[in-house]
Amino acid sequence: MRLSALGFIVILTYGVLVAPLTVEAQPTGKASRIGLLVPGMAAIASRNVEVFRQGLRERGWVEGQHIAFEYRYAEGNLDRLPDLATELVRLPVDLLLVVGAASALAAQHTTTTIPIVFVSVGAPVERGLVASLARPGGNITGVAVDAGPEIFGKWLELLKEAVPTISRVAILVGTTRTPTNDAEVQARERDMQARERAARALGLTLRLFYVVRFEDITEGVFPAITADAHAIDALYAGGATVIAYRQQIADFALQHRLPLMGIVREQAEAGALLSYGTNQIENWRRAATYVDKILKGAKPADLPVQQPMKFELVINLKTAKALGLTIPPTLLFQADEVIQ
């Protein structure tokens, strides 16, 4: 059962929330083909995809009449994304909806003409996806998910507040094996430096694991942590692959009595101790507004990248009880949702 708690909302004053538009008459003739490039599995993404489709229906787009969808799922293996992006472009599609930084970079590398709308991408400027948040400038725009490198400090701070005794944290980051451009190399370095600064301030040491596919988790991360039970006393998991396999990671963490911090509520629902991040359902709903605008003639270059309007903290008290932890009342007071 879930109990609502007092909300802890971070408002980003530079966020741009696009309100639903009044339904206009839709184009007649050939249906616009939308390609969806998703790093995870169809079953896991189904709820978000349906929210996106519903958002288009609310704006008057009728599937099979005005629009058609082509789906490509990487099944948690980010190495597949470039080939899947190429498949969609060659169909061709009229617009690409891509999920996560790896998908966005793969799509960007594949086409400079087909409009691209991204969902759940961190640091799109730093990664070279757009020229600026206000004026993307190319064929790409969408919905970002973070508030800059400072967010790493917030994730670690919340984990430390929940479990003050931790000192060694394993960081699982879902990413592509090889950066696709120099900007991505610099973005990864920026992220790592931000994590290290935050860890030092909290008296934590980090061990980083890059995750490209599921085997990196089962054959790399899990054995490495299991081999030395005293080397790690908490986990942080973020990125497309680790979110796709959130249940397996949450089960492993609980089995080994490791508090787990996630970045989306779905991870807390799967059994992570905490999650702190943007609402994925809302991100997909907002993406539908951009797809609607572009299909009606707007250019991605002129549509500002949307920043998150709020971050939500979800705490799983069932997991806390299983780990023998007592969550401080001050932290419970901040939670947007408590699962028990």
Image (cartoon, grey):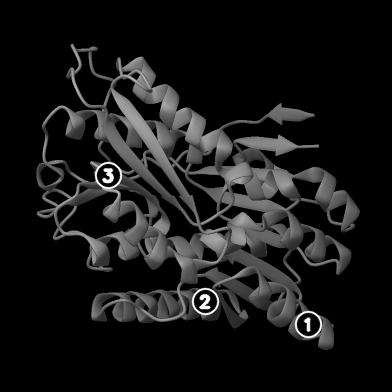
Residue holding disc 2: 201
**Quarter of the figure with residue 150:** bottom left
Q: Quadrant of the C terminus?
A: top right
**Quarter of the figure with residue 33:** top left
CA gap, disc 1 and disc 2: 29 Å
Residue holding disc 3: 93
**Residue situated in front as seen by the camera: 62 or 139:** 62
Residue holding disc 1: 223
Residue 126 image offset from top left, x and y in percent: 26, 68
Residue 319 image offset from top left, x and y in percent: 82, 50
| Observer able to see residue 329 | no
**Residue situated in front as seen by the camera: 336 or 269:** 269
Looking at the rendered image, the disc whose residue lies closer to the viewer, 2 or 3, is 3
Give the residue type at disc 3: Val
Q: Residue at x 26, y 27 (%)?
A: 31
Say what secondary structure mark 2 lies in: helix
Give the residue type at disc 1: Pro
